[in-house]
Image (cartoon, rainbow, N blue to C red):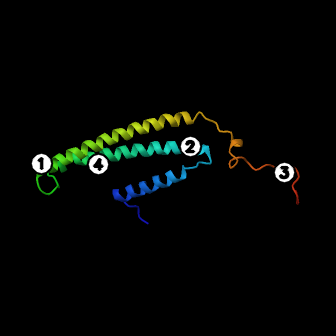
Amino acid sequence: MPISNQPRDHANEAHEALRRLAHATRKMEDPTDIYPVLGELSNSLASLAQALHQIGDFHDGPAHKRSWVTGDTRTGRAASYQIAWELHRAAEMVHQVAAGIDRAHEVEATIAYDVRDFPTLAPAPRRSHESGLSL
């Protein structure tokens, strides 16, 4: 199947992936998943900030000069500037959120979890006398 290059398709995929992540993190059974999840979230937010800036740049560019809004071109230009402002502002907020996650990610790296506290991670106990054949 060919990979789509349509922004709306990727936005929908990102939404679905984040929805599934929110569901999966309701009850985390393996604490060693936290470090890589934080790393991926940080990288994802960097990409989100970039996308928001780029969409804002679209409204900063020639589009606001020839306003694609029907009717009063001044209204279209004003709307375009407002959209650009809000998107660039949101991108900077996302950047700040990513910085907070980066700091949490760094601290998470200092934690060593004891697998005995997490039964699903502990290796199965070895039996001293296995029944059956041995080599």
Query: Which residue is identified by label 1?
Result: 74
Residue that mark 3 sits on: 127
Q: Is residue 5 visible?
A: no
> Is the residue 30 above or below the residue 13 in the image?
above
Tell me which amino acid carries mark 4: Ile
Q: Earlier in the sequence, mark 4 or mark 1?
A: 4
* Label 3 crowd bin: few (<14), some (14–19), many (20+), radius 10 Å: few
The residues bearing labels 2 and 3 have C-alpha atoms spaced at a distance of: 32 Å
Task: Return the residue at label 2.
Answer: 34
Asked if residue 31 can be seen in this view, the reply is yes
How many marks can you see?
Answer: 4
Spot occupied by residue 119 in the image (x, y as percentages of width and height)? 70, 47
Identify the residue at image location x=51%, y=42%: 38
| Residue extending farthest bottom | 1
At label 2, the amino acid type is Ile
Q: Residues within 10 Å of mark 1 (few under 14, many from 20)?
A: some
State the SS at label 4: helix
Local SS, label 2: helix
CA neighbours of label 2 inside 10 A, class few (<14), some (14 to 19), many (20+):
some
Q: Earlier in the sequence, mark 2 or mark 3?
A: 2
- The kind of residue on which mark 1 rests is Arg
